[in-house]
Image (spheres, grey):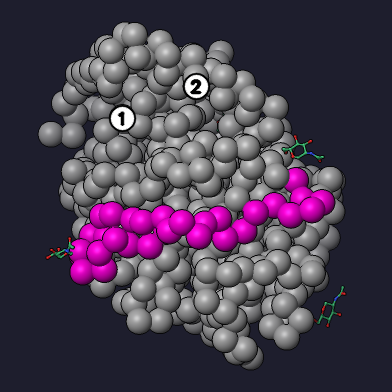
Amino acid sequence: MLYKYPTFVVVISFLSAMDSFKFFSLILLVFSLWLTCNASHHIFPEFQSLSAEVFQVKQFHRTGYHFQPPNNWINDPTGPMQFNGIYHLFYQYNPKGAVWGNIVWAHAVSKDMINWESLDPAIYPTKPFDINGCWSGSATILPGKKPVILYTGVDTQNHQVQNYAIPANHSDPYLREWVKPDDNPIAAPGEGMNASAFRDPTTAWKGKDGHWRIVVGSKRKHRGMAVLYRSRDFVHWIKAQHPLHSSAKTGMWECPDFFPVSLHDKTGLDTSLVGANLKHVMKVSLDVTRFEYYTIGTYNPKKDRYVPDNTSEDGWGGLRYDYGNYYASKSFFDDATNRRILMGWSNESDTPQNDVDKGWAGIQTIPRMLWLDSNMKQLVQWPIEELETLRGDKVEISNQQIKKGEYFEVTGITAAQADVDVTFLLPSLDNAEQFDPSWVKNAEDLCGLKGTNVQGGVGPFGLLTLASKYLEEYTPVFFRVFKAAQKHVVLMCSDARSSSLKKSELYTPSFAGFVNVDLADGKLSLRSLIDHSIVESFGAKGKTCITSRVYPTLAVFNDAHLYAFNNGTETVTIESLNAWSMKNAQLK
Ligand SMILES: *[C@@H]1O[C@H](CO)[C@@H](O)[C@H](O)[C@H]1NC(C)=O
Ligand SMILES: *[C@@H]1O[C@H](CO)[C@@H](O)[C@H](O)[C@H]1NC(C)=O
Ligand SMILES: *[C@@H]1O[C@H](CO)[C@@H](O)[C@H](O)[C@H]1NC(C)=O
Ligand SMILES: *[C@@H]1O[C@H](CO)[C@@H](O)[C@H](O)[C@H]1NC(C)=O
Ligand SMILES: *[C@H]1O[C@@H](CO)[C@H](O)[C@@H](O)[C@@H]1NC(C)=O
């Protein structure tokens, strides 16, 4: 069932030829204006609205258990929430094509965040305050079980403004229909603000003074900032004198997220919680680098300022949620299960023409639970346990040694659509390679320098995912241990450079991050969620996460293989390996 070759035929004929020509010209005009002011997405006007295109592409790379709609472009998850036992995922969506454009808030609902039912778009351009775009935002559930969405509208003057929307019918369990009251916008770019750099309102939190607060992403020259607003009634919002936080030379802050985490356990916290037993997290998506960074720090509710801890670097060298294809994430507090859940977008790494040919672009990563590590210096992420309901056939391996240069196949599962969790037992670390301190700034370059075929002392060892039989193609996810002055340094790589024979046009970096882990017990674990064109990996139980998008040509369906390997002089042992075939999620 997994390996049928679906011939995917989509006929889009929204508009007659005549209408589509006019529409196309309009879109072209609007977006050529935007070209000068919107840095977020490359614009491909010729692909934005395809009126009558017939696609007939073998869907080698469509995912089986990650969320994606049947066709077209998606980006940011927006306003995720759990309301009366139903999870809502809204997301940025182009109803008319496989490149960015015509953006609306598409809407899907679920009982488990894995199987989803798609509904009609919840928010789309209709009013002067959003006629040129309905961009990202968040949901807040007000007392009395009243959800409100805040989103960025692009108004008649192409200014970015913040709007609110409320359910048309609170008794509808799916909250299908949303109303945008006429007293919008609730925040417009004021004097001295850049109207093209003012977007993505956060979930609100409520202070002890009874006032709600939100931040909106912005910048002043090259200083990225989280502009703070306060409101008593959620309708009238006043800009604070100072931002909640800002940081020099980081450029535009998109999709800020600001929330508390518990000091003591994995329990998620309500966004409004303050007090002694918690820290705060500030995450921003940096438009310039297209990666997400966060700091752990302290929120002073009286001064309404956030100060990152001195252990968190506040800039491009900072901690990332994910060191790969992962952006525009958003978290929410699920009060039914007391978890903080993180959703994030993983974009394609192929050309727009290829996205158009296959008819879709972008997927949502598997929702992750998020909490503060016991070292209080970083977060930990782990796929939500609901994912495990899709696990099928299982293989188990234990106490298997892998000597230098060896690799062996994990058979008995569908390697193109699998969940693999492995714990390696390390030998003595005496022969670990020396770490050059200059490497600390750039894990990705280091992984580029030291791939799987550069033999080391302790490592490289790990998995070869989406591998063809004779390794013409493979996406290795692996570790390498170095010896530094004070401690050991662990590098984790998800290296897409050999992922596809079709190389020329792909974005295939040697994604990597360091893993801040204590090797005292001699163990390093790795979990990878493999799904045809995505490998989502969690190192050391979720301390370092890396998502790669890859497009194998040989290692597809039944011709995909999974191997474990070691290319270090020291023998490593697989203490345990559990791997499952994954069933398809139900996406209706
Ligand atoms: C405003 O922001 C846009 C988009 O980032 C940028 O192109 C433009 O230069 C900015 N304008 C000013 C005056 O800084
Ligand atoms: C609101 O939703 C409920 C539950 O689906 C439905 O019974 C009711 O008719 C709806 N009300 C309106 C005004 O649509
Ligand atoms: C960092 O802050 C802590 C207290 O918050 C302090 O004890 C420590 O000395 C600081 N370290 C540096 C390098 O400033
Ligand atoms: C291990 O290293 C050798 C020597 O560089 C290389 O030929 C081989 O391909 C490497 N193995 C893997 C899985 O990359
Ligand atoms: C994803 O696509 C690649 C290839 O086009 C770009 O290089 C990345 O910048 C992009 N990532 C995001 C978050 O847009």
Residue 120: percent from left, percent from top: 26, 44
Looking at the rendered structure, the kind of residue marked 1 is: Asn
Hey, which quadrant is residue 82 in on the image?
bottom left
On the rendered image, what quadrant is the C terminus found in? top left
Hey, which quadrant is residue 33 in on the image?
top right
Q: On the rendering, which quadrant does ligand 1 occupy?
A: top right
Looking at the rendered structure, the kind of residue marked 2 is: Ile
| Region in magenta | 165-194
Q: Which residue is mark 1?
A: 71
Residue 382: percent from left, percent from top: 44, 62
Asked whether disc 2 touches disc 1, contact meaning CB atoms under 8 Å apart, the reply is no
**Residue 187 inside the magenta-drawn segment:** yes
Q: Residue furthest front?
A: 182
**Which one is closest to the eye, mark 2 or mark 1?**
2
**Residue 458 inside the magenta-drawn segment:** no
Q: Which residue is mark 2?
A: 27
Q: In the drawing, does residue 152 fall left or right of residue 289?
A: left
Element under disc 2: helix
Residue at 49 percent of width and 30 percent of height: 100
